[in-house]
Image (spheres, rainbow, N blue to C red):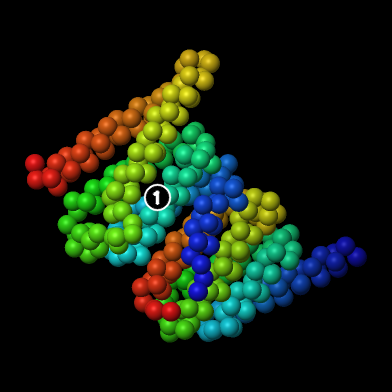
């Protein structure tokens, strides 16, 4: 049988193989990634695909495969999708259909949380570095706005997920 | 002399277009190895001479539409699905690389038409088909 890794490798190598300088292409690529991250998980197989895509997005950002300037406009939507995945813990439909995963791997919401935390720490560090390196001391208005939006969203995601944890703990 | 040459070229292009059209029809109605061989032919067709392909872009992307239909339709029996996943998808991924990688893309599509969406539409279908196949068949 065909090795599924072929497909994931293909997706992961898109920034290297194809032309991400084209804004249309970049837009299509991120819409595709975000689309897969947002699919409704109905069974183990869709869950595996989403897990793979979580890792792909994480690698693209944290391993500097795509520059901050390129991924920043898409970051709010990406974080929104991670939020949805982390909140699967209290999603009754998901729990009824898929439930917890096999004993060998952590539940998808924990997996999403781990990757989300890595993304957040990378993002904050990257913002700090970008702002320090900006000689003009004046970030472009758009970038400053997006950074503010991303930070606000990170705070909101933490709030939502922590409130879910309280619910799950019966508080 | 020059006009004769142009006329000959035009005739050759017409023949090539007809060949591609026939291959497209075979892909629509074919099964098993015929489909894979048609796909390989299509791949060879694209990479053999990108400047020629450039003159036939609409025909090439009509063929891409057939590929999309193929990936969408689960009209085959289990053996055929297995064969398709094993041989069809890697060939399709190679075709996408040859069509959209920047060095070839500019030759195949000098006008840089907005055809890139095909790549992601196909990838989505490939993923869907792979997990559908995994769900429906035990190898």
Q: Farthest residue in the front direction?
A: A104
Q: Which residue is mark 1?
A: A54
- Numbered disc 1: what chain? A
- Quadrant for the C terminus of chain B, please: bottom left
Please state which of residues B77 and A87 is positioned toward the viewer in this rendering.
Answer: A87
Q: Residues within 10 Å of mark 1 (few under 14, many from 20)?
A: many
Using residue A150 as the reference point, say whether residue A71 is left or right of it. Answer: right
Q: Residue B9: image x %, image y %?
A: 79, 68
Q: Residue A33: image x %, image y %?
A: 43, 51
Above-or-below relation of B75 to B43: below
Q: Residue B127: image x %, image y %?
A: 44, 64
Q: Residue at x 43, y 24 (%)?
A: A128
Mark 1 element type: helix
Q: Farthest residue in the left direction?
A: A171
- Quadrant for the N terminus of chain B, please: bottom right
Above-or-below relation of B138 to B104: below
- Res B118 seen here: no
Please identify the quarter of the rendering in which residue B7 is found.
bottom right
Q: Residue at x 40, y 72 (%)?
A: B134
- Res A105 seen here: yes
Q: Residue at x 9, y 45 (%)?
A: A170
Q: Residue at x 65, y 69 (%)?
A: B43
Q: Give the number of marks.
A: 1
Above-or-below relation of B44 to A163: below
Please state which of residues A54 and B58 is positioned toward the viewer in this rendering.
Answer: A54
Q: Residue B72: image x %, image y %?
A: 43, 71
């Amino acid at each position: 049988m065909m090795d599924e890794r072929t497909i994931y490798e293909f997706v992961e190598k898109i920034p290297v193989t194809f032309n991400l300088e084209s804004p249309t292409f970049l837009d299509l690529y991120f819409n595709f990634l975000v689309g897969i991250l947002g699919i409704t998980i109905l069974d183990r197989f869709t869950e595996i695909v989403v897990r793979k895509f979580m890792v792909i997005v994480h690698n693209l950002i944290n391993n500097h495969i795509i520059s901050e300037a390129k991924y920043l406009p898409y970051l709010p939507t990406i974080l929104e999708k991670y939020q949805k995945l982390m909140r699967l813990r209290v999603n009754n439909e998901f729990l009824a259909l898929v439930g917890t995963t096999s004993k060998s791997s952590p539940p998808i919401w924990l997996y999403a949380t781990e990757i989300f935390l890595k993304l957040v720490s990378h993002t904050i560090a990257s913002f700090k570095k970008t702002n320090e390196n900006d000689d003009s001391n004046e970030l472009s208005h758009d970038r400053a706005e997006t950074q503010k939006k991303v930070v606000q969203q990170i705070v909101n995601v933490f709030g939502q997920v922590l409130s879910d944890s309280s619910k799950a703990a019966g508080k | 002399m020059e006009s004769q040459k142009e006329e000959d070229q035009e005739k050759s292009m017409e023949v090539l277009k007809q060949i591609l059209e026939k291959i497209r029809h075979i892909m629509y109605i074919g099964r098993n190895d015929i489909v894979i061989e048609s796909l390989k032919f299509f791949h060879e067709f694209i990479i053999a001479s990108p400047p020629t392909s450039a003159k036939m872009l609409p025909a090439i992307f009509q063929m891409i539409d057939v590929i999309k239909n193929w990936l969408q339709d689960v009209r085959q029996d289990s053996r055929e699905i297995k064969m398709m996943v094993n041989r069809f998808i890697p060939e399709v991924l190679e075709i996408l690389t040859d069509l959209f990688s920047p060095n070839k893309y500019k030759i195949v599509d000098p006008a840089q038409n907005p055809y890139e969406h095909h790549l992601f539409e196909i990838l989505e279908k490939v993923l869907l088909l792979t997990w559908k196949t995994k769900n429906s068949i035990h190898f």
